[in-house]
Every structure is written in C-alpha cells, then in structure tokens.
Image (cartoon, grey):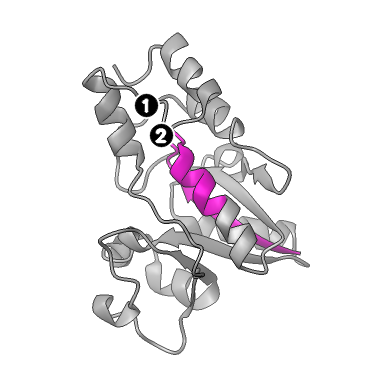
Amino acid sequence: MKIAILGGSFNPPHLGHLLMARQTLEFTDVDEVWLAPCYNHTFQKHLAPINDRVAMTKMLVEDKIKFCDEEIKNKLSGDSIDLLNILKKKCPRDQFYFIIGSDNLAGFKRWGRWEKLITENDFLIFPRPGFSTHLVDYDLDNKKYRFELVKNDLLVITNISSTIVRERIENKLLINHLVPDNLVKYIVNNNLYR
C-alpha cells in the first residue's frame, strides 16, 4: 500500500489540511493519507495541549484519511525522519511518502537531519500560493532527492493556515469557512486560542 503522511502541528487542523489530503488521494496513486500531529515541534512553537490537537485532528478522519499517533505514542522530538523510520519498520511492506507544502521548502534545511531525511524518503510537494515549487530555487535540485509535485488542472490551492485561523480567533473573527463545523464547536467549547 502507498501511504502519504501529512505531518504537522495541527494547531488547529483546518480545511486546508483536508484539501491537501483529499487531493493527494485524487491526483496521485497514494492509497491512504495519514494525519500525524507532532508531539513536540522542531522549532519550539507554542502549541495547544496535545490531547486537544489529537481530538481536533481526529475530526478530519474520513474513509481513506486516517489518524496516525506514532509520533505521540513515542513522544518524538518533531523530526520527521524519526516518525518515518518508525513507520517503515512497523509496516515494511508499505511505501511511505511525506507531504510537504511548498511554503516549507524555503526552510527545509532547518529540519532535523534533513539530508538523511531527503535522501532516504519520498516526498510529495503540495503547491501553496506565493511559494515556488521549483526545487532549484531552494538549492534542493539534486537527482538523489525524491520529490514529486502534486499537480492537476483541477487542483485547488489555498493560503488557509493554522496561523490565520488562530489570528482570526484572537481578533474575534469567524473561522467557519476555514475549519469544519464540529471543529469550530470544539475550539469554542474548550476556549482554545483566545
């Protein structure tokens, strides 16, 4: 089976995550997408409590979009290579891909053990508005790297981000068009991001 990992802080999860997951299934030969919230963030970002981020991420689960708790169970550092190594050992018959938004390419060399990560794993690059998808722009254009661009004439890209959702909440603006309804209720009921 071909499995794409969509990792991140999911702080909070939003419709942009769902668009990436659904369209990865539509426009690549991936069989499932696994949502993998980080336990810790590599760049020490302030995060909502892990139990809240887990509960919210699970609200995005659909038929071929699954929840992956390996990072949390193993209390990993946030370095993607650790998660991928665990998954490859646990599921040796499956082929794993890691989804990365093109907005993350500029800072990719800050990722933990990025050179090992990039030479041992397959990546799907999802375009984000305003960010190049050309690896040469980031000095990553090398034949030993396994990057594949998710592309299709019907592909929908968006600038929805967890940062925008949090800032809208802080400014008492609606988020209903950015986050699924059940997730909006969870955020309000648990007084998150205020």
In the drawing, does residue 175 fall left or right of residue 58? left
Question: Does the magenta run of residues contain 18?
Answer: yes
Tell me which residue sits at (74%, 65%) in the image.
94
- Which residue position is annotated with label 2? 178
Q: Quadrant of residue 111?
A: bottom left
Q: Position of residue 81 (x, y in %)?
A: 50, 61
Q: Residue furthest left?
A: 171
Q: Dot 2: what SS?
A: loop
Which segment did they paint magenta? 1-21
- Which residue position is annotated with label 1? 175
In the drawing, does residue 33 fall left or right of residue 164? right
Tell me which residue sits at (45%, 56%) in the image.
156
Task: Give the residue type at disc 2.
Answer: Leu
Q: Position of residue 166 (x, y in %)?
A: 30, 29
Q: Which mark is residue 186?
A: none
Which quarter of the rendered picture does the N terminus lie within?
A: bottom right
Q: Quadrant of residue 85?
A: bottom right
Task: Give the residue type at disc 1.
Answer: Ile
Q: Residue furthest bottom?
A: 143
Q: Are marks 1 and 2 in contact (CB under 8 Å)?
A: yes
Which quarter of the rendered picture does the C terminus lie within?
A: top left
Q: Position of residue 168 (x, y in %)?
A: 27, 27
